[in-house]
Image (cartoon, rainbow, N blue to C red):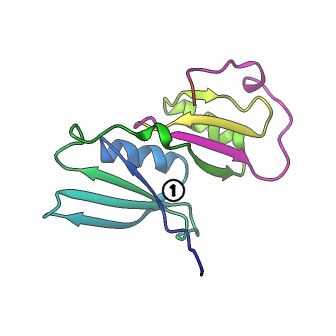
Amino acid sequence: MKTKYLHTMLRVKDLDTSMAFYSLLGLSEIRRVENDRGRFTLVFMAPPGQPEAPVELTWNWDGDEGLPSDSRHFGHLAYEVDDIYAMCQRLRDAGVTINRPPRDGHMAFVRSPDNVSIELLQAGAPKPPAEPWKSMENSGHW
């Protein structure tokens, strides 16, 4: 029996805001489904050249207030980046809080507008520790 990864689905409160956040990570829209009858939109976003690894952003037109909040069972999304310092600076410049700075030159965590934990990992060997990251404290939780 063969198993194939399809996608990770995340419910989002504001589709445009969430898409802008994932665009900062380098993802772009690869497919969209508008379902008038079900009153929802699905937007699949993936890193360049990796359509097999999408995140599905699910936006319910009428909101999600009636749905149970059981997201505590979800861990995080993880993305490898070419330059963790440059990516963290890009996110920081856009107003994103770096919850776990890349003090080790290898790993950082941020949160999406919908409070989804995002792990960023440096491709290859860790970068040498550098300021402002190496002395930056954690903020919140990830």
Q: Residue at x 61, y 49 (%)?
A: 78
Q: Residue at x 16, y 46 (%)?
A: 62
Q: Quadrant of residue 84?
A: top right
Residue 47's place in the image compared with 138, above or below, is below
Would residue 81 appear left or right of 26 to someone viewing this image? right
Would residue 45 appear left or right of 34 to someone viewing this image? right
- Residue 138 position in % (x across, y down): 65, 21
Residue 14's place in the image compared with 130, above or below, is below
Residue 137 falls inside the magenta stretch? yes
The magenta segment: 114-140
Residue 85's place in the image compared with 50, above or below, is above
Quadrant placement of the N terminus: bottom right
Would residue 29 appear left or right of 125 to someone viewing this image? left
Q: Quadrant of residue 119?
A: top right
- Residue 93 position in % (x across, y down): 54, 31
Would you say the magenta stretch is mainly helix, strand or loop?
A: loop
- Residue 71 position in % (x across, y down): 43, 40
- Report which residue position mark 1 lands on: 27
- Residue 120 position in % (x across, y down): 65, 43
Q: Nearer the viewer, residue 88 or 70?
A: 70
Q: Nearer the viewer, residue 95 or 122?
A: 122
| Residue that extends furthest to the bottom in the rendered view of this protein | 1
Quadrant placement of the C terminus: top right
Q: Quadrant of residue 110?
A: top right
